[in-house]
Each structure stands twice: as structure tokens, then as C-alpha cells.
Amino acid sequence: MEAKAPMPNTTEKMKSVKALWDKAVAGPKKEAAMKHYRAAEKAQAAKNDAECLRALDAAKLALA
């Protein structure tokens, strides 16, 4: 039986993405990232880790 990779800690990833967002220059990319970050907050509150992580990945991508 194959071992599954552990899920990243959503709280730690939220802090990481928020730090990136804080450093970003104001503009459309930062606004788009905040929309994804808020979606991640809602998913985390609903205890939906998979959706939270997807939203955080989208937020990071928006800032790229």
C-alpha cells in the first residue's frame, strides 16, 4: 500500500500567501489575489482543506 503525502498545513500556507500579498504592489494582480485569498478563508472556515489549498494556489498564481 502506497503512503499518501501529507496535506500542507492550511494555516501555515495562509500565512505564507498573506505575506506575499502584503509585499505585492497595488494593482489588478493584488486585487485578484485577494479574491482568491478570501475564498480560501471561507473554505478554511468550512473545514474544506482541499478547496482552501486550491484557492491559495490561485492567489499565489495571481501574484506571479
Image (cartoon, rainbow, N blue to C red):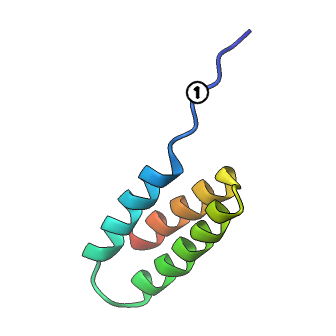
Residue that lies at the very extreme toward the top in this rendered image: 1
- Residue occupying image coordinates x 31% and y 66%: 19
- Residue occupying image coordinates x 27% and y 83%: 25
Of residue 9 and residue 57, the one placed in the foreground of this image is 9
Residue 15 location, quadrant: bottom left
Of residue 11 and residue 40, the one placed in the foreground of this image is 11
Residue 53, how many percent across, how many down? 58, 54
The reply, left or right, for residue 34 in relation to residue 25 is right
Residue 1, how many percent across, how many down? 74, 9
Residue 43 location, quadrant: bottom right
**Residue 17, above or below 29:** above
- Circle 1 is placed at which residue position? 5
Count of numbered marks: 1
- The amino acid at mark 1 is Ala
Residue 55 location, quadrant: bottom right
Q: Residues within 10 Å of mark 1 (few under 14, many from 20)?
A: few
- The quadrant in which the C terminus is found is bottom left
Residue that lies at the very extreme toward the bottom in this rendered image: 27
Residue 10, how many percent across, how many down? 52, 51
Of residue 25 and residue 46, the one placed in the foreground of this image is 46
**Residue 52, above or below 41:** above
**Residue 59, above or below 10:** below
- Residue occupying image coordinates x 47% and y 72%: 62
The reply, left or right, for residue 28 in relation to residue 38 is left
> What secondary structure is marked by label 1?
loop
Residue 7, how many percent across, how many down? 58, 38
